[in-house]
Image (cartoon, helix red, strand yellow):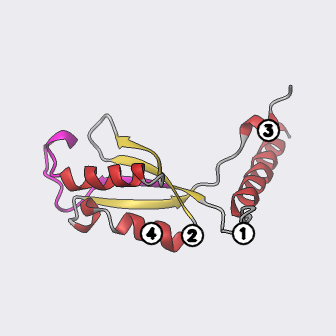
Amino acid sequence: MKILFFSVFLFVAGGIAYAQNAAPTPSGSPAKQTYLVVYKPGPKWLAGKPVAEQPLKEHFKYMLSLYTSGTMRFAGPFSNDAGGALVFEATADAEALAIVKTDPAVINKIFVFELNRWDLVQWHKYVKK
């Protein structure tokens, strides 16, 4: 019974978080959604080489541009040299996909990716005070 309650709680809490994220902002512009990208080695990944030795200079510049524009929330390589992850914000799935497909490491097939909209739960709202 506890597991069922907890599962229902997570489902409802996730739905609330999604609804809050999807609502228009007071200015009338669409709210930003959070996205998670998991990068994995692609066909042009240099086998046997760590992330630091991959041809990722343009990818790094692109990540820096996402950061300076306020799009990126955080990103970085996995410690086991198996790719990396990026968390960023966009107003719609199409915009998010365009951001990832514009990444030079994706264009050059160094990385393949998995893109997911991430409905973050605002856990602080559920903490009893």
Q: Is residue 50 left or right of residue 30?
A: left
Q: Which SS class for mark 3?
A: helix
In contact (CB < 8 Å): disc 2 and disc 1: no
Q: In the rendered structure, which segment of residues is drawn in magenta? A: 36-55
Q: Which SS class for mark 2?
A: loop
Which label belongs to residue 28? 1
In contact (CB < 8 Å): disc 3 and disc 1: no
Q: Tell us which disc is closer to us: 1 or 4.
A: 1
Q: Can you tell which quarter of the image residue 124 is in?
A: top right
Which of the two labelled residues, at mark 3 and mark 2, occupies the earlier sequence position? 2
- Disc 3 and disc 2: Cα gap in Å? 25 Å
Residue holding disc 4: 97
Query: How many tags in the picture?
Result: 4
The crowding category of the residue bearing disc 2, from other C-alpha atoms within 10 Å (few below 14, some 14 to 19, many at least 20), is some
Residue holding disc 3: 125
Q: Quadrant of the N terminus?
A: top right
The crowding category of the residue bearing disc 4, from other C-alpha atoms within 10 Å (few below 14, some 14 to 19, many at least 20), is some
- Disc 4 and disc 3: Cα gap in Å? 30 Å
Which of the two labelled residues, at mark 2 and mark 1, occupies the earlier sequence position? 1
**Residue 63 among magenta residues:** no
**Residue 50 among magenta residues:** yes
Can you name the residue that lies furthest to the front here? 27
Q: Residue at x 66, y 68 (%)?
A: 30
Q: Which SS class for mark 1?
A: loop
Residue type indicated by callout 2:
Ala
In this orientation, which residue lies closer to the viewer: 11 or 68?
68
* Residue 56 in view here: no
From the top left corner, tell me how far across and down residue 60 is, in percent: 27, 49
Q: Is residue 8 left or right of residue 24?
A: right
Can you name the residue that lies furthest to the top here? 129
Which of the two labelled residues, at mark 4 and mark 2, occupies the earlier sequence position? 2
Q: Tell us which disc is closer to us: 3 or 1.
A: 1
